[in-house]
Amino acid sequence: MWRRVASLSSSISSSLLAQTASRLNTWESLTTGIAQQAKGVIAPKEKTPFITFVLGGPGSGKGTQCIKIVETFGFAHLSAGDLLRREIASKSADGDMILNTIKEGKIVPSQVTVKLIQKEMELSDNHKFLIDGFPRTEENRVSFERIIGVEPNVVLFFDCPEEEMVKRVLNRNEGRVDDNLETIKKRLTVFQALSLPVINYYSKRGKLYTIKAIGTEDEIFEQVRPIFAAFERTVG
């Protein structure tokens, strides 16, 4: 019987073979995709990511300007602070650790923050990202480039006097655990000590754009707009 069946194989049309091969390829692609997602690996996007780091002390106005950049240029806004607060709200073990670290005015471990950012980037359909409030330290910077595998295209630094930042934070009244005078002063001290090396690094790399963060929201944005307008044709 098997010889008879084998003899029939020559009568199978080439189109049927092509259909079978196509279905096998489709199934292989599907199963590979599922396996990759299970491992946390996402298939590369069609466009190369365009990444902007947004740096500045608490109350420097970087979050407000990120909203304007999103509205004008279509970026996805990833706030490191918001991602950390979301993790705190989840009541996970990492969330408890993050809460205690923030209360002490310290920096959350780099790998924790980078993994949260990476997850959001992988889930996004956008290829243009504003990463707000990160990296805060040289360790953050190195961890991002090691884990994500790319450097930022642009680094914005919102330069604002300390007394102005303190006033803004105390006046915003958002009910955040770190919006009190004692913690603000700790955060500003940490920012000055740890973020300036990052700012200097990207300045030497020719990627830093310093924004004078004093004035109205629109006046400050007029410093920001030309930076992204210049990249608009190549970024898409």
Image (cartoon, rainbow, N blue to C red):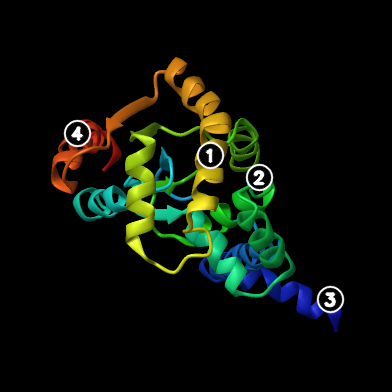
Q: Are marks 2 and 1 in contact (CB under 8 Å)?
A: yes
**Callout 2 amino acid:** Ser
Tell me which residue sits at (37%, 65%) in the image.
173
Q: Which labelled disc corresponds to residue 135? A: 1
Note whether 173 is above or below 167 in the view shown.
below
Q: What residue is shown with label 3?
A: 3
Label 1 environment density (alpha carbons within 10 Å; few <14, some 14–19, many ≥20): many
The residue carrying pointer 4 sits among few (fewer than 14), some (14 to 19) or many (20 or more) residues within 10 Å by Cα, namely some
Frontmost residue, 217 versus 86 = 217
Q: Do labels 1 and 3 touch, CB within 8 Å?
A: no
| Amino acid type of the residue that numbered disc 3 sits on in the rendered structure | Arg
* Residue tagged 4: 223
Gap in Å between the C-alphas at discs 4 and 3? Answer: 80 Å
Seen in the image, is 178 located left or right of residue 51?
A: right
Could you tell which of marks 4 and 3 lies nearer the N-terminus? 3
Could you say where residue 30 lies in the image, as x and y percent from the top left? 60, 68
Q: Which badge, 1 or 3, is on the more N-terminal residue? A: 3
Q: Are marks 4 and 3 in contact (CB under 8 Å)?
A: no
